[in-house]
Image: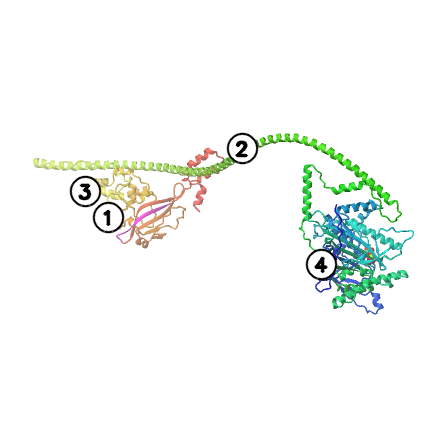
Amino acid sequence: MQRAWKGKTPRRPALKKTNNVEKDPVGVYCRIRPLGAEDEECCVEMISSSTIQLHAPDGLKANRNGEYKETQYSFTKVFGINTGQMELFEDVARPLVEDLIQCKNGLLFTYGVTGSGKTYTMTGSPGEGGLLPRSLDMLFNSIGPFQAKRFVFKPDDKNGIDIQSQVDALLERQKRDSQQSVPKTPSSRQKADLEFADMITPEESRKSKNIDEDCSYSVFVSYVEIYNNYIYDLLEDAQFDSVRPKPPQSRILREDQNHNMYVAGCTEVEVKSTEEAFEVFWKGQKKRRIANTQLNRESSRSHSVFTVKLAQAPLDADGDYILQDKNQVNVSQLCLVDLAGSERTSRTRAEGSRLREAGNINQSLMTLRTCMEILRENQMCGTNKMVPYRDSKVTHLFKNYFDGEGKVKMIVCVNPKADDYEETVLVMRFAEMTQEVEVARPVDRPIYHLAAGRRHRNQAFKDELSRRLEERGGPVNGGDSALMNQLIESLPALPPCELVDPTDDQTLPRLIEVLEQRHRIRQMMTEQVTHTANKVKFMLQQFDSQMSSKDTFVHDQQSKLNEKEKVILNQKTEIERLEKKSKTLEYKIDILQKTTEMYEQDKRSLQQELEGQEQMLQKELSERRRMEQRMQGVVTDTKLKWEKECERRVNAKQLEMQNKLWVKDEKLKQLKAIVTENSSGGSFPPEPPKKPERPSRERDHTMPQKRSASPTALPGFNQTPLGQNRVNVRTFQDHYCTSTPSTSSPYPSVASCISEWEQKFPIDSGSQSRLHGTPQNQNRTPAPGYSTNSVDRRRGQRWAPDTEAPTNDLDRNAGTRTVPPVRPTHRRSRSAGGEKWVDHKPASNLELDTVMQPIIPNAIKVSTPNEKALSKCHKYVLRHQELASDGEIETKLIKGDVFKTRGGGQAVQFTDIETLKQECPTAPSRKRRSGSDEGPAQTEDIENRAPVGGTSSSNGYQKRRRP
Ligand code: ADP
Ligand code: MG
């Protein structure tokens, strides 16, 4: 058990009046209450948030001949008629509560005429709590969990606070409880709670954030009334005698060692909650009301002072107990003063004692006014006049706020009605003057040299301890104090032991009796404890043996568990191994999947390629088939031609041989005649034998002559365009030449012609390829051993340059053979390059989309050939377009050499034909697909036929080709 620390409140050094002290002016706020009736005349107007204007009421103006002007007054802040209690609290009282928690004193008083709203502002009404309940609420919201146990802080009688241990506090609590004559009824408590509950809504609750959690707090409230310059304690417990009412005992003021004035012997009630504090306040109010009624007092003429005192002391280093050092106890207080009405005596119409009261009331307010004036003068002018605080109890009580330090705020309440005008003007003047008074700012509280967060750490430690105890099945609550409480409560209460009378022979025996009783109980308890201890010992032994058997069991189980754990461990490793394996397999699967995808892509592309190639192959095959067919046709043609030719030659040979035979026969006959003439003389020459006739086919002029063997024809014959005529002429000549013996004829015989021709063109050359337009044929130089077609082309034909080229080789072979007028001796070699071309492109030609377009450098492009162009070039090419058998337009490049004619003109000998042609491979298949549904078999068929189909034209395709 710790002894109470009975230290003395340290004397604070008296505040020297130095200029270094920081000072704040008294905060003066003005609150205008709404008018009682709307039609009332209003003489106060709020101009801005800090200024109001007073207008003299009409009647007054008339009385004083308009002497009164409008006057303006400025304040720290003005609150209009619509200002709520909360707003006022936030601006005015909240900072004071914060200061209180920070160990700084504050004084807040309401000033104004009766009915201006002073009590409303301070106390409020149900649903609209005033500054007092709100301040209490904020204070308890802030210190709530950090409050010390009741009686740990204990007011001494000198305005200081003592501190004692928790145990002492507990004992004192018990003592007080046992002495309490009338226990609180729950109903009254409930009622008070309800009254408070009406004041503030939970949303309006405020809380300070600057609370020091490493301190313990206690709140004490006192409530005094100053009436007629007497101070009455409103919380005093004295019973009011309704039969013979005694005037209440007034209290005197004393100064404590800190120079603070206090009401000596005033009741200070320790309160632990807002409700409790308000209950105390309510109790005081009630008492005040009863006294006023009983003693026939005017309530508006008393000043009421409600003081909230906050004691705080730091927790020890462990954060467990409050530091038992009175020097460390900080006490701060907030005084909430509801002053009496400031109206003058004349207005109250009081008589007799009442008049004296009213005068006194005004006297105290007058003293307040005087004090403020002198203070202001001293502060402003540097004078040192004595401030008459002692002249009234109110000023005396708050002397140190102005002399020492603290925060002072005043709310000036104004009723804007015309009746109050004159009083209001006085109030305003006082208020304006008051705000020029400065008060020393309270200094900051000392900082304890202890680590912060002690309470928190201690709480955490306790929580942990109880948790562990709970785990072990021990007591959950370390409620030593509760147990102790119970124990002490169970003991017989101590009787009052005050010895007043020396002859008192009752008190001591009664005390002895009670103590003996307690002693007996103690002995009984000790015995019980010993008995219980033995029992517990026995139980413990039993428990021990049980424990040992349990231990062995546990040991067994442990070994089993270990084995199982080993198995589990093995399985875990196995699982890990398998997991790893599955992961690698998954990885492999991944890779394989990717590879498969790649291969599939390759496969797809290859398949596409294959399909393309197959299509090409098909195309080539069909092309080849077509070519074969064409070749076969050509071969048959050639064969037929050659057969006819051979027949013709054989006939010619036969004829020649017959002719020769005939000539020889003739000669023989002539010789024979000569011989017989010579031998017989005068015999007649024999009849010449019949000249053998040409075979009928030889004479058939409808059969075209295929070749002309001789390039050197007679000039006269050269002019004939048809070789057929020439052959006829030659045949005619042959006939007549052979009849003359002269062999020196310039004309070759038919036989010589044939033999010469045979030398040039062997029969087997017909089997050679003669496809016109193929590249092999185009670049060949004229040489023996070419087919007839080829030779004809090499020899060329002569046309006028602007005539159309023959459309068919066979036609050309049939009859339009001509001989170039000049031997092409001057022709340059093709390999030499640099040949100049006449590019004849008739205007009617269409542009085809063929890829292989002829690009001829050094070409003169013409749409109609002319002499001038031809004279400059060695080569001529004609772009001839026609419709092919498959309906496609094909362009033929008919190339030739340009010769100079003897007559000075130009002639062209055609040498080559190149064909440009485009086919549409898809046209027929497209056409077919647009028809009805066809299965895969048909599709294949279409694909196979596609190249063939390219040669036949579709309507759509033709349209595209012929815009
Ligand atoms: P005082 O204490 O100055 O004599 P009271 O506070 O008793 O004046 O107010 C007188 C009446 O005026 C009360 O009924 C109160 O409810 C009302 N009252 C005062 N101020 C206001 C206000 N700001 N808003 C509403 N009613 C008010
Ligand atoms: Mg009042």
**In this rendering, which labeled residue sits more in front, label 4 or label 2?**
4
Distance, label 1 to label 3, CA atoms, is 18 Å
Query: Does 901 lie within the magenta span?
Result: yes
Q: CA distance from mark 4 to mark 2?
A: 74 Å
Q: Which residue type does callout 1 highlight?
A: Gly
Q: Which residue is mark 2?
A: 574
Q: Quadrant of the N terminus?
A: top right
* Magenta stretch in the rendered image: 891-903
Image coordinates for residue 153, horizontal then vertical, percent: 76, 50
Asked if residue 302 is positioned above or below residue 882 in the image, the reply reads below
Lower position in the chain sequence, tag 1 or tag 3: 1
At label 2, the amino acid type is Glu
**For numbered disc 2, what is the local secondary structure?**
helix
Q: Which residue is mark 4?
A: 443
Of the image marks 4 and 1, the number of the one nearer the N terminus: 4
Marks 4 and 2 in Cβ contact (< 8 Å):
no
Horizontal relation, residue 634 to residue 514: left or right: left
Q: Main secondary structure of the magenta part?
A: strand
* Residue pointed to by mark 3: 737
Q: How far is disc 4 from disc 1 in space, using C-alphas?
A: 152 Å
Disc 3 residue type (three-letter): Cys
The answer to whether residue 84 is visible is no
Q: Which residue is mark 1?
A: 716
Sequence-first tag of 1 and 2:
2
Residue drawn at x 86%, y 51% is 238
Place of residue 265 in the rendered image (x, y in percent of width and height, measured from the top left): 82, 54
**Mark 4 is on which residue type?**
Val
Is residue 416 rendered magenta in the image?
no
Query: SS for tag 1?
Result: helix
